[in-house]
Image: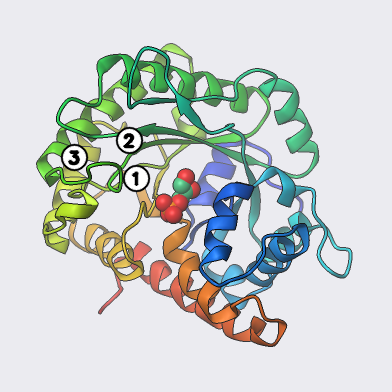
Amino acid sequence: MAAPIERLEDIAIAMVADGKGILAADESSATIKKRFDTIGLASTEESRRDYREMLFRSEGMKKYISGVILYDETIRQNAADGTPLADIIRQAGSIPGIKVDAGAKPLAAFPGETITEGLDGMRERLAEYYALGARFAKWRGVISISDSLPTWGAVKQNAQALARYAALCQEAGIVPIVEPEVLMDGKPGDHSIDRCYEVTQWVLKTVFAELYDARVILEGMILKPNMVIDGKNARKASVEEVAEKTVRCLKSTVPAAVPGIAFLSGGQSDEEATAHLSAMNANFDLPWKLTFSYGRALQAAALKAWGGKPENVAAGQRAFTHRAHMNSLAALGGWEP
Ligand code: 13P
């Protein structure tokens, strides 16, 4: 197993290596239960471990996955043979990462909006995660669109929290993934792509202003944004339109010093998430790497093929490897339907 990479800038570059992207496997216990419910599987410490061990031991991990975002439980878990799961990730040539936020909670005085919690005690937790092998972290701020939302208060407070988190990570030698997610599948979810553009631009401008004020080193971070896309209940924009508007929005807001942008999938279908990423890489000159940090769009097919049955582990791994391969091609602009 290679020694871990230690400089922030080097870790960030490795996270967006050519043809590689990040596996978001950091579902909280409540979220993974919802995913397991779809295959009729009880969510237990062991079933969660078996599922994630299956993904981490797949062929696709070695070839296409630069890093894995873990949940607190998983970074402390051992595989069935006793090997720490974080070691299995490292043996596959990938970097273990950790979700450090405590989730989006209702924001006082701002009905319908949330603030992400988890800053208290973060310095100590980051030191512990570093000792457990994590070299990057993730914090997700959530912004909802409706006729009257988001408000400036919610945008500003979420951006500030992201910036405070990012500075703490860098102090600990951990690369922050800064994730301000403008929801496509919030309620009512009927907004246009142009409204998504306007809100995403506003949010990213605010986030980078806060990162500057917090003295965050842009070369040692990764941005994880939503794509610019119409709401889940109003989807009609073409692949070309999503790609063009997303790239235009990012170019107007994200400094070139940021080494890489790794998108969330946010409720897009597996193929849409792949097609959009490929179109961006194929058709535009970009100052940063553009890749994936998908949760659902990398895992949905594997979860279904596995179905919670030991005899289906190989089928689950094949399904995961296939999606990872397609997204690797997309990260190089070479995916074809
Ligand atoms: P999705 O790709 O399923 O949106 O998840 C990515 C993620 O990490 C959200 O925080």
Check disc 3 and give the amino acid type. Answer: Cys
Identify the mark at residue 196; answer none if there is no mark. Answer: 3
On screen, residue 208 above or below 221: above
N-terminal of the pair, mark 2 or mark 1, is 2
Q: Residue at x 72, y 58 (%)?
A: 90
User: Spatial distance from mark 3 to mark 2, Cα to Cα?
Assistant: 22 Å
Image quadrant containing the N terminus: bottom right
Q: Is residue 36 left or right of residue 249?
A: right
* Eye-nearest disc, 3 or 1: 3
Q: Crowding at label 2, few (<14), some or many (≥20) Cα neighbours within 10 Å?
A: some
First-in-chain label (3 vs 2):
3
Look at the numbered discs 2 and 1 and tell me whether their residues touch, using CB distance below 8 Å. yes
Q: Position of residue 325 (x, y in %)?
A: 45, 74
Query: Quick check: 308 above or below 175?
Result: below
Image quarter for residue 102? top right
Camera sees residue 259:
yes
Colour mapping used in the image: rainbow
Amino acid bearing label 2: Ala
Determine whether, in the image, residue 153 is placed left or right of residue 311: left
Q: Nearer the viewer, residue 101 or 62?
A: 101
Q: Residue at x 59, y 78 (%)?
A: 307
Observer able to see residue 18? no
Depth check: give the residue in front, 98 or 303. 303
How packed mark 3 is, by other alpha carbons closer than 10 Å (few <14, some 14-19, many 20 or more), is many
Q: Position of residue 222 (x, y in %)?
A: 46, 39
Q: Quadrant of residue 287?
A: top left
As helix, strand or loop, the secondary structure at mark 2 comes to loop
Would you identify the image quadrant in which residue 261 lies? Answer: top left
Distance from Cα at disc 3 to Cα at disc 1? 22 Å
Q: 245 above or below 125?
A: below
- Residue topped by disc 2: 256
Residue that numbered label 1 is attached to: 288
